[in-house]
Amino acid sequence: MSEAPAGPPAGLRAKGCGEATVLRERGQREVFCGLTGIVWLHRKIQDAFFLVVGSRTCAHLIQSAAGVMIFAEPRFATAIIDERDLAGLADLHEELDRVVTRLLERRPEIRLLFLVGSCPSEVIKLDLSRAAARLSESFAPRVRILNYSGSGIETTFTQGEDACLASLVPELPAEPQRSGPSLLVVGALADVVEDQLRRLFGDLGVGPLHFLPPRRSPELPPVGPQTLFLLAQPFLADTARALEERGATRLAAPFPLGAEGTTLWLKAAADAWGVPRTRFHAVTAPGQDRARRAIAHSAQQLSGKSVFFFPDSQLEVPLARFLSRELSMEPIEVGSPYLHREHLAEELRLLPPGTLLSEGQDVERQLDRCRAARPYLTVCGLGLANPLEAEGLATKWSIELLFTPIQGYDQAGDLAELFARPLTRRDRLVA
Amino acid sequence: MQLTLWTYEAPPHVGAMRIATAMNGLHYVLHAPQGDTYADLLFTMIERLDRRPPVTYSTFQARDLGGDTAQLFQTAVKEAYERFRPEAILVGASCTAELIQDDPGGLARALALPVPVIPLELPAYQRKENWGASETFYRLVRALAGPQAPPPGEKRPGRKAATAPSCNILGPTALGFRHRDDVFEVTRLLERLGVEVHRVAPLGARPGDIARLGDADFNVVLYPEVAETAARWLERSFGQPWTKTVPIGVGATRDFIAEVAALADLDPTPLLSGQDCRLPWYSRSVDSNYFTGKRVFIFGDATHALAAARIADQELGFKVVGLGTYSREFARSLREAAKGYGVEALITDDYLEVEARVAELQPELVLGTQMERHIAKRLGIGCAVISSPVHVQDFPARYSPQMGFEGANVIFDTWVHPLVMGLEEHLLAMFRDDFEFHDGAIPSHLGVSTAEGDERRTTLPSAALSETSAVTWEEDAEEELRKVPFFVRGKARRNTERFALDQGLAIISIETLYDAKAHFGR
Ligand code: SF4
Ligand code: SF4
């Protein structure tokens, strides 16, 4: 690199006080679009089907992001728009009705169908909400049909989950009258994590407890003014807003990554329920202890090492907080496609002062900065990982953080290990 | 609007990426939204490329649509040029940019860059990956070699007596099925024949090499899907003939040698013996008797499917029971070939249709793409991969060409492996009631990873079920059927059911099973 990397002006760094200013970039992005969320969402909601209305590119993106073509009949598909549709030779709405009818005939077990908008469907202004309403009429009550956009012109990567969950919010039943407070955990979590959290909240006496998304569509959680909710993921801005519009209240907390994050996250709910300190301690101490012991296995490998985040899932800030506070790593740059100041407030406060935050992306400039900084570990997407490895930089591909259970006490060690593994591997390989 | 679960081909701009990524000194600026950058991972993860594809995406967003997406694109071209200093630039639109009609070609030309700018028109709602690769290669060759072409009507000067005949190898791309190794093998073959390889393109070529393509005496087209259009243009413009035989399999390799020798005016005899090719002898050795008449279903791109059918039929003694392709552009040649094998060609890019056909035919071996591998796995049939679409496994560390005599050796091993494993599994099945060999045990050669375990052998496609629904099996007949080795079990079931239908029997007993066996003679 001959040119000096553009260093961030002073003042564009996290101040460790929640009022971080950031390096905002606008250039080529190297992030998936929101359609990608389908890959994990269709596994989570077991009676839902995701029908993308888009192009061959959209179909190919999901197929490639799913990595291996393992499922004969996965619960997602693409209705590929072709030239006849565009030339007006075929009526798009009629075509869509035909495709949906064929699909639902083939798959009688489907109870919830999402029509997922894409860039092409948005650009030609195909109104999927109208289509969803119309189709709902024909298929009710057997199938509920909703729509959201996962398009790359509007959403990055994990924002697809946000859009999907937000589309579910109007469907949630109202909470029963005078029912007392209930807790809603929002964001797709692995079943094993849900079960652990269920036990913890049960022991704390916090409840009734519900999850969004549910495992099956008839189990949609109730919502209303008595509902308090905890975000389990940092990328759920629209979902949170929609829940607030239904009267629910967000409990501010860091995200449940690592021992500390999990404790503070649980504590936000415990405090709202007035759980006594001693009880909170009694319930969470074993988990905290296990988490710390598990994390310790990776500490030697990670402690004191620098880490650089390319923007990807919006998990970057909580992960940087976890790595810096529980594993003593030094975040050089924490890039995120979007920084939700409010939802991240508790996280930003815990970041080491001086951490460079960047929002948006100009991938070439960011690569310049990364190469100049030569971090010990670079967290990035699949398109960049091998090329950076070939340049001698150790990488962790970030998509794994969405496919692996990482939240809660009993996954904290696994989470640390995900970051340690690339480094351990390098130590082992001699040839 | 077409309902698609899996797609055999990517959109056409990915075909263009395969050309750009194969080359050096070339850059591709694509007007596209951010999600389309996923295509990088095809190269960095599946092919394990150690560098990023030379592609810049404009990544416009919704908020740019009202404003100036054209400006955004121009900036992307300008910055890409300044940063990467390519010798030539391809520009084009992905599916979304095609709809907003910004004219990437015009915008890029307006920048007056000091290098050739080649605009690509790849209609994303009509065409697919292979067409995109072919069109891109053709445009590139035309733009870069065109200025070197002699005036129309001028005859090509004859080769000087002292110089060796020379050819270009056309067609290998990034992300191609074994392209890297095929090039190596074919180059070796050509050199042994006494032909000098002038340029290989697009794989490993620079724009300057493309400009010099016209200097060779003729062209070797390895992958017609990618290179035929360009080769035809070179023939028209430079008077270069090109090879029509794709050297996959022993017979085709011999034909190819003869074809090249004729073009180059050389003697093919010493090479034709194919001394280092083991396939013919292995296929004649007695243990291969077992392969006789094995029913094989073949599906892939046209080149590989056609080659596979010929090898299966003539060189391994299998029986081709199904032949198909997703390359509609080559439907005609495939239909002709299918007729020769007495089967109806399957021309489709609908995965479900292929699955239904496999289920219906119950072949003993499937030769297909990664998609068919999954179909076969679910139906419990052995499978070898012969064509794109590819997966990371299709880029093996070892040398494994498909072309030439060594390619034939590789093919023998790869195809025979699932059959031999099938035999082994049969032996295993004979001990099925032993506690170690319980029925749920997963055959080791299937190499099932945990991620795949949960959805193996789920639903049979409806076509298979509807066929069988007319007759019922008595329980002990079903039990008896289970004793039939699994690799012929499907066929036995199918024959018995067909026999029962013909005889007007609604119920299949043990008797019926053996009557059917006698009737069909196997
Ligand atoms: S970015 Fe747009 S066009 Fe590309 S895959 Fe995503 S939704 Fe489809
Ligand atoms: S051990 Fe196996 S292979 Fe050898 S003779 Fe006995 S059955 Fe045949």
Image (tube, coloured by chain):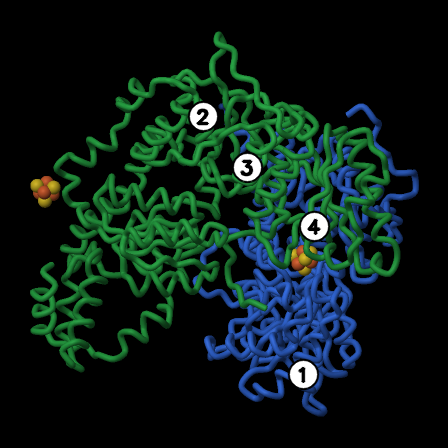
Residue depicted at x 45% and y 55%: B451
Spatial CA span between label 3 and label 2:
24 Å
Mark whose residue sits in front, 4 or 1 = 1
**Residue A346 at x, y percent in the picture:** 79, 58
Mark 3 and mark 4 on one chain? no
Q: In the picture, residue B234 is in which quadrant?
A: top right
**Amino acid type, residue under disc 3 in the picture:** Arg
Count residues near mark 3 (Cα–Cα under 10 Å), then give few for <14, some for 14-19, many for 20+.
some
Mark whose residue sits in front, 3 or 2 = 3
Residue bearing mark 1: A133
Q: Chain of mark 2?
A: B
Does residue B179 appear left or right of residue B435 in this picture? right
**Residue B499 at x, y percent in the picture:** 16, 72
Q: Chain of mark 3?
A: B
Spatial CA span between label 4 and label 2:
36 Å
Does residue B396 appear left or right of residue B465 in this picture? right
* Closer to us: B92 or A416: B92
Instruction: Give SS at disc 3.
Output: helix
Q: In the picture, residue B281 is in which quadrant?
A: top left
* Closer to us: B8 or A70: B8
Say whether disc 3 or disc 2 marks the residue closer to the N-terminus.
Answer: 2
Chain B tint as drawn: green
Does residue A11 appear left or right of residue B100 in this picture? right
Count residues near mark 2 (Cα–Cα under 10 Å), then give few for <14, some for 14-19, many for 20+.
some
Residue bearing mark 2: B184
Q: In the picture, residue B148 is in which quadrant?
A: top right
Residue depicted at x 11% and y 70%: B513
Query: Is A71 situated above or below A270?
Result: above
Residue bearing mark 4: A31
**Amino acid type, residue under disc 1 in the picture:** Ala
**Amino acid type, residue under disc 2 in the picture:** Phe
Residue bearing mark 3: B232
